[in-house]
Amino acid sequence: MAEVRKFARITGEARTQMSQHVVAEYNQGHSIREIAEETGRSYGFVHRVLRESDVTLRGRGGPTRRPRR
């Protein structure tokens, strides 16, 4: 994947390549935050690219709440 300047607008072929990379990384089990750090993009950008690519997002995980008594 070609190096993209931080905060630079990504369009056309560069965006297509970026989205393919992001989707592949996410499908391999990497988190959105990990992908954002690796690519130098924001969490929101990575999330938006995944949504635009019709990827089913995983749950956030963490502890679940106990039922009220």
Image (tube, rainbow, N blue to C red):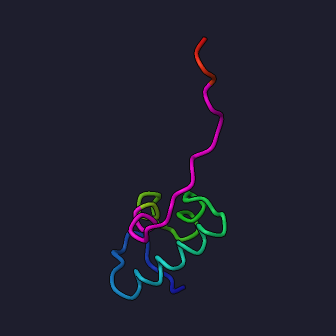
Whole-percent x, y for residue 44 in the image: 42, 58
Asked which quadrant contains residue 58, the reply is bottom right
Q: Nearer the viewer, residue 68 or 49?
A: 68
Quadrant housing the C terminus: top right
Disc tally is: 0
Whole-percent x, y for residue 54 in the image: 43, 68
Asked which quadrant contains residue 8, the reply is bottom left
Q: Is residue 29 left or right of residue 32?
A: right
Whole-percent x, y for residue 38 in the image: 58, 68
Q: Residue furthest top?
A: 69
Quadrant housing the N terminus: bottom right
| Above-or-below relation of 14 to 29 | below
Query: What residue lies at 47% left-to-right and 84% top-to-bottom?
Result: 17
Q: Is residue 32 left or right of residue 9?
A: right
Whole-percent x, y for residue 35 in the image: 57, 65
Give the residues in magenta: 48-65
| Residue 56 is a magenta residue | yes
| Residue 47 is a magenta residue | no
Query: What residue lies at 65% left-to-right and 34% top-to-bottom?
Result: 63
Query: What residue lies at 33% left-to-right and 81% top-to-bottom?
Result: 11
The secondary structure that most of the magenta stretch takes on is loop
| Above-or-below relation of 1 to 23 | below
Query: What residue lies at 58% left-to-right and 75% top-to-bottom?
Result: 24
